[in-house]
Amino acid sequence: MAEANYPDDLRYHDQHDWVRLDGDDAAVFGITWYAQDTLGEVVFYEPPEVGATLTKDQPYAEVESVKAVSDVIAPMSGEVTEVNDVLSDSPEKINEGPYDEGWLVKVKLSSPQEYEALLTAAEYQKLLDR
Amino acid sequence: MNVAALRRTPLYEQHEELGAKLVPFAGWEMPVLYEGIREEHTAVRTHAGMFDVSHMGEVEVEGPGALEFLQLALSNDVAKIAVGGAQYSCLCNESGGVIDDLFAYRLGTDRFLIVTNAANHETDLQWLGRWSRDYDVAVRDVADRYAMLAVQGPHARAVVAATLKIELPERFHVVAQNVGRRPALICGTGYTGEDGVEMLIDPEVAIPVFKELRLAGVVPCGLGARDTLRLEVCFPLHGNELTPERNPIEAGLGWCCKEETGFLGSPRIRSARAAGTAERLAAFTIEGAGIPRDGNPVLGERGEQVGVVTSGTFAPSLELGAGMAYVRSDLAEPGTAVEIDVRGKHRAARIASKPLYRKRS
């Protein structure tokens, strides 16, 4: 995806993650267009284990480009129910479609109320513009 | 480091115009990539890429005592370089440690040009100046005289010859030619494992020459690709594999040390060669997932530390994690299984023969 893009139906964490709610207490996480653009082509994604507990604001996975490693920060707390297996063979999907094919984990949320504190697309973009 | 104090090469504006990602490197503001490290790496392996390496330094050594002095200062047998020839050497301290690694070009019977690593240029100059006092020789810093452009890849020589309409030197030779109607030195050397040239050209014509080559299809490449390319063919990088605390023998550079010339550090290097070294520089590949990084510990079969990674990366042509490491000598043989501690995760790895990447011929 060549152009910056921040869908309105997602919420954002200031460490460049997005959250898509899936029902009342489940969600999908990924990294934003800005995060993948800064990192460059992703050549390796180290997912958490299914069942792992994620804590808001703590690292839960790693993405690596040829020369750099970046922690992925949990935007909300919960338990991993599914990881995107496609990424183990095709980590570049994170660059190609950070909001669809490049999703990282599905999570059963332990504190769904954390969602309200996340940034809207407009707020996140304002943060990037600073 | 104060960003304002960074030096810029004659090609800086060109890099900005192309949207390069610029980073501080050895006191210079250098392009690490333009489009992407992987694309640039592949361009050099399959076609032709060019690197602005104007940050590298040049030192001219001239005078009746030039050869004799360089036999003292450089590890290789400088007398073996014919006029128009090039030779790789280490610049060693008295303990046999590597101050810098470099190419020496013989421009005349009594005139040599040395190309230094940017980070070591001042140190090299001081060292050469200090040891040249007893010789009939002048050591001059001529770094500002040149912009340096490396054009590398299977098609590099053909494109350079056709585009700049110049005759090219054989591998490990140097010829004087006009580039952009200004005197230039064309060297048949490189740091990528591919065929190609390194050109020392007038800074005034650096941008037009770069543009002309780009129009001819040569892909601008940053220091990121330069690093992955050299690592795949196991060329050492000073500061990573080579340091003043390591001798050339443990670094696998015994082939460019000719102790019989009596160069500085040669007694220590002779002993190291005879006795063997406790550690040796080895190449390795990761067996499954994971990307090694500089500084990662190398672990033996009981989990004990047996070495340290000096350069680690994702190797684009191999499509796996790979690197070089100093490991205990008894474990440095190709085929030996080790583990790399990558931020707490133990990744299975195997010592591999050098180079890691072999050109398809």
Image: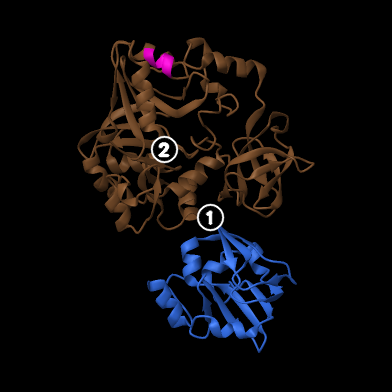
Chain colours: A blue, B brown
Q: Nearer the viewer, residue B315 or A10?
A: A10
Q: Is residue B101 magenta?
A: no
**Mark 1 Cα-neighbour bin, 10 Å: few <14, some 14–19, many ≥20:** some
For this orientation, the residue located farthest to the bottom is: A24
Q: Position of residue A120 (x, y in %)?
A: 48, 83
Q: Which residues are magenta?
A: B69-73
Q: Nearer the viewer, mark 2 or mark 1?
A: 1
Task: Give the residue at mark 1.
Answer: A68
Lateral position of residue B256 relative to residue B309, left or right: left
What chain is tagged by disc 2? Answer: B
Q: Position of residue B122 (x, y in %)?
A: 35, 31
Task: Give the residue at mark 2.
Answer: B196
**Mark 2 Cα-neighbour bin, 10 Å: few <14, some 14–19, many ≥20:** many
Q: Which mark is residue B324?
A: none
SS class of the residue under badge 1? loop
Q: Nearer the viewer, residue B142 or A97?
A: B142
Q: Position of residue B216 (x, y in %)?
A: 33, 50
- When the figure is inspected, residue B112 is found, relative to residue B42, above or below; the finding is above
SS class of the residue under badge 2? strand
- When the figure is inspected, residue B178 is found, relative to residue B219, above or below; the finding is above
Q: Amino acid at mark 2?
A: Gly
Q: Is residue B72 magenta?
A: yes
Q: Position of residue B115 (x, y in %)?
A: 37, 30
Residue at horizontal 42 percent and vertical 32 percent from the top: B189
Q: Amino acid at mark 1?
A: Ala
Lateral position of residue B243 relative to residue B319, left or right: left
